[in-house]
Amino acid sequence: MPTATARIVVQATPQEKRALVAKARDLGISVSELMRTGAANFNPAPEDLLELAQAAQESIDRSLAAIDAAVASVAESNARIAAMEAKAARA
């Protein structure tokens, strides 16, 4: 491999930098080599990501429907309790 001489600046938090340095050290390579290798191998499959996003949206929709049903049930229960309390107060 040719010697790498061009610089690319990558912004990272101090925690991210520590994690990158530790990972490179554990692998026995430089941080630069870790970043080059990671970038070269980064290739998310858009179809997989779209499928995952759709599944997440469907889960959100089901959760929202369950929450709406629970809120409606609580409201109905509160109305029944209020009616019983009103009836008891009149007695």
Image (tube, rainbow, N blue to C red):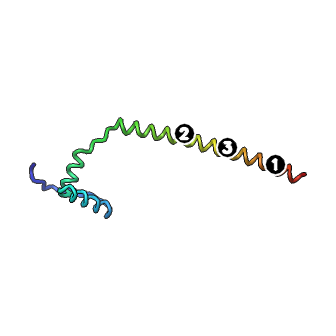
Asked if residue 14 is positioned above or below residue 64 in the image, the reply reads below
- Work out whether residue 71 or residue 7 is closer to the camera in this orientation and state it: 71
Report the label total: 3
Asked which secondary structure carries label 3, the reply is helix
Going from the N terminus, do you reach mark 3 or mark 2 first?
A: 2
Image check: 4 left or right of 19? left
Of the numbered discs in the image, which one, if any, rests on residue 72?
Answer: 3
Image coords of residue 73 (percent x, y)? 68, 43
**How far apart are labels 3 and 2 at the CA level?**
15 Å
Mark 2 packing: few (<14 Cα in 10 Å), some, or many (20+)? few
Camera-nearest label, 2 or 1: 1
Q: Secondary structure at mark 2?
A: helix
Amino acid at the residue labelled 2 = Arg
Q: Is label 1 or label 3 in front?
A: 1
Kindly report the distance in space between the C-alpha atoms of the residues bearing marks 2 and 1: 33 Å
Where is mark 2, residue-wise? 62
Extreme residue in the bottom direction: 14
What type is the residue that disc 1 sits on? Met
